[in-house]
């Protein structure tokens, strides 16, 4: 099919994505780092380190679910932004928490399931340092021209 | 029906809820404040002020969707915690963004739709200072004994 | 705000909605009946009777969740169709099952939470004959011109 | 980890799953057929043929979204039932419609993402005859002992 929103657009590189991420105060606060940008597979991988502000209970080293949800929303968005080269509003998303995230950095992979002319849908998997799956997200973004 | 998870439990007061909120580093960072706790209606209302770290684009005054999602997850959780007096893990939730949140504090109301013996379901509405509806959430929490 | 997709459109009446419903083979099979169409409140109420094909286990009289999900998708859609006078594709939806639906007809109310220029969001509540809440849905539809 | 709900249970075979499916009036009406049951990969594949009652608009040959949602709920459920050998109630699920399903049979694959002691999460992909992805589902089921 020839109905993808990203036809004929040169994708953002890894460095361009990182610069755009760092330009947002909230995303800079999260501290997301792009580790692999694969426009052919429509897949984007980032990492995120723990910060004291992310802790659920003081001294537990466990991530609160809130930052995980925010990370899922953001990495999913950038998987589409990679191919479309512009900011895309989130319409809605779902997060499922599968295992506690304790004393670990995160590896997040986002894979585009559909990049249509009005909406795009992305799946996001969040892993710990040991490659155990901690949380999964599914998000819908508006791909309409701004 | 006599199958509610909260039967015979004395609900948390507003002050008790606030203390529990402030005990979590992430929630303290969000800065959520309980303004009304109504166990009879199974409804909880909080407010949240803007912080520089929540900004989507530098200087815009617009909330990033990430903190909104984290706030929805948290306020929904506490609407159930109010009646059950213990921490409850989030199973999953959905967020829908309806309007941009710009240069405003938030008023968040969470209403329990079902507090069963194994799961609870809560609806969360997020309003701006002018009472416009900005985002809505629907979340499922585990109510199983720890 | 003056940004609703339904500005200046004369809403469908209850009878017009029923005719449109009956024109779809699947919806006619479900047997949905419009009982109240309230465009001012952007709220639509339908009923649905049990059929043998909807049964979860033979002889139990319990609704399978599948027809409930289909009913939620459809009634939510028509709450927006009421104001926009045209078919609207579902983008996505979520269903939460709260209590078993056993030996009962259904009363379904759908309330528009947002009818924007590109997407609309609707909440749907499903009750049994005794007004107990059985299932809830939240659905997003495309409101873009066809 | 040794915390899977299915530890030490002999999985249902393809034929056992088909018998259980056919025992439900609603699922028999859908006409789902198991084509591959892979307990090692926690993956289940079924097919479903078009029926006149599934049509969105008369004579269009297009599937209404309702049966697609019901199919997603059911196939996802059986991906967990395969390993647990008992019926499992759906807690909630999300469906995203990606492309119209027109004049085609369906191939549905369900993959378990997590089978915990209280809840299980399953991803479901729905394809047409040409292997185009039409719809995706993500569902949570109760895995608690009955």
Image: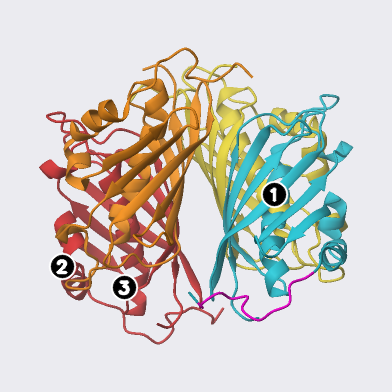
Chain colours: A red, B orange, C cyan, D yellow
Left or right: residue C103 compared with residue B10: right
Can you tell which of label 1 and label 2 is closer to the viewer?
1
Q: Is residue A31 visible?
A: no
Nearer to the camera, D2 or D25: D25
- Circle 1 crowding by C-alpha within 10 Å: few under 14, some 14–19, many from 20: many
The chain identifier of the residue carrying mark 1 reads C
The chain identifier of the residue carrying mark 3 reads A
Residue C116, compared with residue B88, is above or below; it is: below
Circle 1: element type: strand
Q: Which residue is mark 2?
A: A22
Residue range (magenta)? C2-12
- Locate the N terminus of chain B and report the quarter of the image it occupies: top right
The chain identifier of the residue carrying mark 2 reads A
In magenta stretch: residue A116: no
- Pick out the residue farthest to the top: B8
Q: Is residue B20 visible?
A: yes
Circle 3: element type: helix
Asked if labels 3 and 1 share a chain, the reply is no
């Amino acid at each position: 099919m020839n109905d993808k929103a990203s036809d004929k657009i040169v994708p953002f590189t890894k460095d361009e994505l990182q610069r755009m991420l760092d330009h947002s105060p909230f995303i800079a606060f999260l501290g997301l780092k792009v580790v692999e940008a694969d426009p052919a597979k429509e897949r984007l991988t980032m990492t995120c380190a723990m910060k004291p502000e992310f802790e659920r209970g003081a001294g537990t080293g466990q991530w609160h679910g809130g930052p995980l949800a925010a990370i899922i929303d953001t990495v999913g968005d950038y998987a589409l932004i990679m191919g479309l080269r512009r900011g895309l509003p989130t319409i809605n998303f779902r997060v499922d928490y599968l295992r506690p995230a304790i004393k670990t950095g995160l590896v997040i992979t986002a894979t585009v399931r559909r990049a249509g002319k009005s909406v795009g849908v992305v799946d996001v998997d969040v892993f710990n340092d040991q490659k155990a799956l901690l949380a999964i997200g599914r998000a819908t973004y508006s791909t309409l021209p701004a």
